[in-house]
Amino acid sequence: MIELLTSPEAWAALLTLTALEIVLGIDNVIFLSVLVSRIPEPQATRARQIGLALALIFRIVLLSVLVWLIGLTQPVFTIFEMGFSWRDLILIGGGLFLIAKATHEIHGEVEAREGGEAAAQGPQRAFFWIILQIIVVDLVFSLDSIITAIGMAKDLEIMIAAVIIACIVMYVSSGPVARFVAEHPTTKMLALAFLVLIGVALVADGFEFHIPRGYIYFAITFSLAVEVFNIMARKNRKRA
């Protein structure tokens, strides 16, 4: 442990891995922000805190079973000469869940059913259903994040430190992101479109067709910049 604290290579690995974990955590934060926007604020805050706590717990637990995780990348069956591992199946299933969930939410937004489902289900049932969805997506994103960490760092201490720092950043940023999405309805539609894009990328990864995340995050950043200009323009028109 002392050797890691005095090793420049260890600090470089920690900084690089932390930055990567934060970037990968953006998907998690976007999904949480969209989900909690449909329930009242006190419950939304609780759901967000529970979701991020579960994300941290899942990541640390997965890091503690590295041997099992490495085994997840070994093919369990083959179809048309393409091998599928448990990791591939989880990514495909999680990606399809994201696509289906985002599409369902977009359909609700288009039909102006904002908050209708949550009200119909009742506050407690809606809260429980949202927590279940958060658990599913946390598992998918945690698996992808930790397998990436295993490929980048050799020391478990560095991986755990990077994951904890990234989860702290996710926790701090989740509140402002959720409030921004709630205050600007058009950004919610944009966030849902991002979730469809991320879901497609996860499914593609499951079929061993990797879409560079740089392309996805560039598209997200560019779209957000355009949306910020739209928000500024709307505010200026109101003032005028």
Image: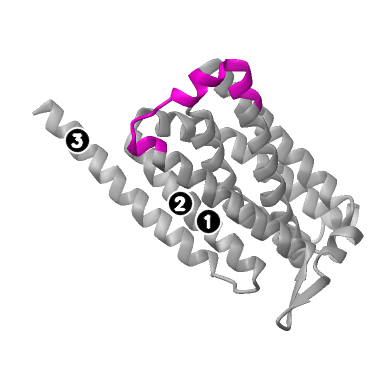
Q: Are marks 1 and 2 in contact (CB under 8 Å)?
A: yes
Q: What residue type is labelled 2?
A: Phe
Residue 131 or 8: which is nearer the viewer? 131
Q: Which amino acid does label 1 sit on?
A: Ile
Q: Mark 1 points at which residue?
A: 198
Residue displayed at 34% across by 35% down: 111
Q: In the drawing, what numbered circle is on residue 78?
A: none
Tell me: 47 left or right of 10.
left
Q: Earlier in the sequence, mark 1 or mark 3?
A: 1
Residue displayed at 72% across by 46% down: 139
Say which element carries label 3.
helix
Asked if one can make out residue 8 in the rendered structure from this viewpoint, the answer is no
Q: How far apart are marks 1 and 3 (CA)?
A: 29 Å
Outermost left residue = 240
In the image, residue 148 above or below residue 179: below
Residue displayed at 51% across by 42% down: 30
Residue displayed at 69% across by 51% down: 140
Q: Mark 3 points at which residue?
A: 234
> What is the span of residues highlighted in magenta in the rendered image?
108-128
Image x and y of residue 169, in percent: 61, 40
Which picture quadrant has residue 227? top left
Q: Residues within 10 Å of mark 2 (few under 14, many from 20)?
A: many
Q: In the drawing, what numbered circle is on residue 194?
A: 2
Q: Are marks 3 and 2 in contact (CB under 8 Å)?
A: no
